[in-house]
Amino acid sequence: MKLRDLTELAVRNLRESVLRNSLTTLGVAVGVASLVAMLSLGVGLQQLATSRLSKSGLFDTVFVTPKFNMRSGPQSQAGAAPDGEPRLLDETTRQELTKLPNVIEVFPQIRFPTEVRFDSKPYPTVVAGMPQSSRLSGSFDGMVGNFFSGESADEAILQIEFAKDLSKDTNSLIGKTLAIRYAERQPLADSSGGFSIIPKERQLKIIGIVETEPASGFGGFGNGRLLIPLGVAQSLRATQINDLRDAVRGGPAKPTYPSLTVRAKSTSDVDAIEAAVKKMGFGAFSLLDASKSLKIFFGVFDLILGLFASLALAVATLGIVNTLVMAILERRREIGVLKALGASDGDVKTLFFFEAGVMGFLGGIGGVLFGWLIGRGLNLATNIYLKRRDLPSIEVSSVPAWLVFVAITFAVVISLVAGFYPASRAAKLNPVEALRYE
Amino acid sequence: MTATPASTIQNAIQLDHVSRHYTLATTTIRAVDDVSLTIRTGEFVALLGSSGSGKSTLLNLMAGLDRPTSGAIRADGKNLAELSSLELARYRRNTIGMVFQSFNLLPRMTLAENVELPLRLAEVDHAERDARVAEALQRVRLDKRTRHRPSELSGGEQQRTAIARALVNRPKILFADEPTGNLDSATGETIMNLLLEIQSGLGMTIIMVTHERPLAEKYATRLAIMGDGKLLSDGTLSGAKQ
């Protein structure tokens, strides 16, 4: 039989016992809906986690350090300069790194201890310089106030815990001025590599308060509770830990950075940049491996969710088997007529397969719709909960196009498998006995 | 429809020592027992016999719905006993048409759809189907009722629809299993006249199973009488209607 005829006959047969077939199809839809809802939750959580992490800049970033360990000295001679000394991270190196392929920007990590004076009281803390690009990291989403107006603006953003130290009413801090006291590094005139430390003070206007510590726990931003523009941080020439190391080693006169952050165009460029940096004689580290582990974790998570959800679909397939076996009993005479008119065993089998497939297809479409609605419900409920706690809204459930395709295909395939036994049974019916059936 | 020229006398179907035995527990039932019969093209043969005589079993064997336990059934140049299941289906689809006592129309389909069913199975082009359905329904004078469902028709009309369905694929042989069994005598006469008209008009071979001897004698050109699975007698009727 032609495909069009098979489809017409299958749909016509399904319409004959509309209630029973609708309930069976609904069973498939419920199974698919549970599958879609579960997987959409897995996909949504994965997207949430990866987008937050990728926005944080950790996964498109290579952290560069000199091959010099404070505990054991030079780690290897591979990165040694011609004179045998390990290469240091200075402005020349920064420019070299900027020229590497697929590098967006290279900036130093500047972090130094300070004493904040506010309302005539001292508050010791750590200052961190933030590049303008960190605005897009996601860390400043939902912040109170504004981001820095420019690289050289005398402005400060406070981490919420530090802001609480300054005032119980943190929002009232916006617009007020504080002073930071720090140790400025001034090279000695004798080119010995030594330097003087001069206490300095700088007035900064508080323009914002941020919930999280941007990229906390890693690199130069870790534990920075008072954030200032990177340009300002560089201009302060505040003494950092590598200054002491450089003085002990007897030079150089020009300032160096404890580490540099190299931002790649995309995560796929990170490996190549990391290799190039290492080749230049520096230590390089990225969190890309952590990202890969995250993907594996969510892959397993999705698999487990999918397996549980598939149980509902497995139950639904039993419904298809039951419905089609009942249909064979009811339509035994019709099968006999079809065979008497020239239908082959294959035609009868294909007809029942089609009926199973149509139920699976319709159930798949219905299931995707139900699953999507469940996902919407989950998002709504989650965001109501978050809104009550003044937290930004998120999407915990997501139904991508591939999930729609996979769910419908899976429903059809499972239905065809379920239809195999009834279809074979129908095909094997003896036409003489079938025609005699009342 | 294509008519077989009356001058071309050849065998439509030939049975050589055909038997069909069933085994129930330890008992062997000889439904058809060593029957040999040759039916020529264009004949109207009535298989007559009482209930359980084996006439319907013999018809099913000739129609390719069942396989003989032994013997050979030659039709359309092939031995049906040796055909695969798929080849038998093709034989039923292209070579024969069947009419049943209980009409066997599909209740959810209209007349036209019922008649179209063999064309679907034979994968006839959609463009050609409508014309062939109309032609078949016109032949049985039901061309005004194409959109009706079987339940809206009388028994005679349903049987005429079944005949149209049997004719639509232009078969060489028409098998009719008690075609008037569920009809009153007047309607039965109408159906028999229609079959006679088809036989004479199209030169089609008709093999009809019946237990009504007067009906068989009135319309058939040849009478084959069955009893206990055996062919008891086989003879041409001189008074058969043409």
Image: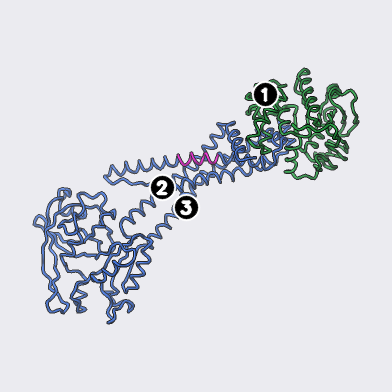
* In the rendered image, the vertical position of residue A382 relative to residue A228, given as above or below: above
Letter of the chain that mark 1 sits on in the rendering: B
Chain shown in green = B
Q: CA distance from mark 3 to mark 1?
A: 60 Å
Can you identify the residue that label 3 sits on?
A: A303
Circle on res. B143: 1
Classed neighbour count for the residue bearing mark 1: other residues with Cα under 10 Å, few (<14), some (14–19), many (≥20): some
Name which residue type carries label 3: Leu
Q: CA distance from mark 2 to mark 3?
A: 12 Å
Image quarter where the C terminus of chain A lies is top right
Name which residue type carries label 1: Asp
* Left or right of residue A252: residue A47: right
Image quarter where the N terminus of chain A lies is top right
Can you identify the residue that label 2 sits on?
A: A41
Classed neighbour count for the residue bearing mark 2: other residues with Cα under 10 Å, few (<14), some (14–19), many (≥20): many
Letter of the chain that mark 2 sits on in the rendering: A
- Label 2, secondary structure: give it: helix
* In the rendered image, the vertical position of residue A376 relative to residue A107, given as above or below: above
Chain shown in blue = A
* Left or right of residue B143: residue A24: left
Quadrant hosting residue B233: top right
Could you say where residue B137 lies in the image, as x and y percent from the top left?
69, 26
Total labels: the figure holds 3
Report the span colored magenta.
A359-369
Quadrant hosting residue A290: bottom left
Along the viewing direction, whichever of A73 and A253 lies nearer the viewer: A253
SS majority, magenta: helix
- Label 3, secondary structure: give it: helix
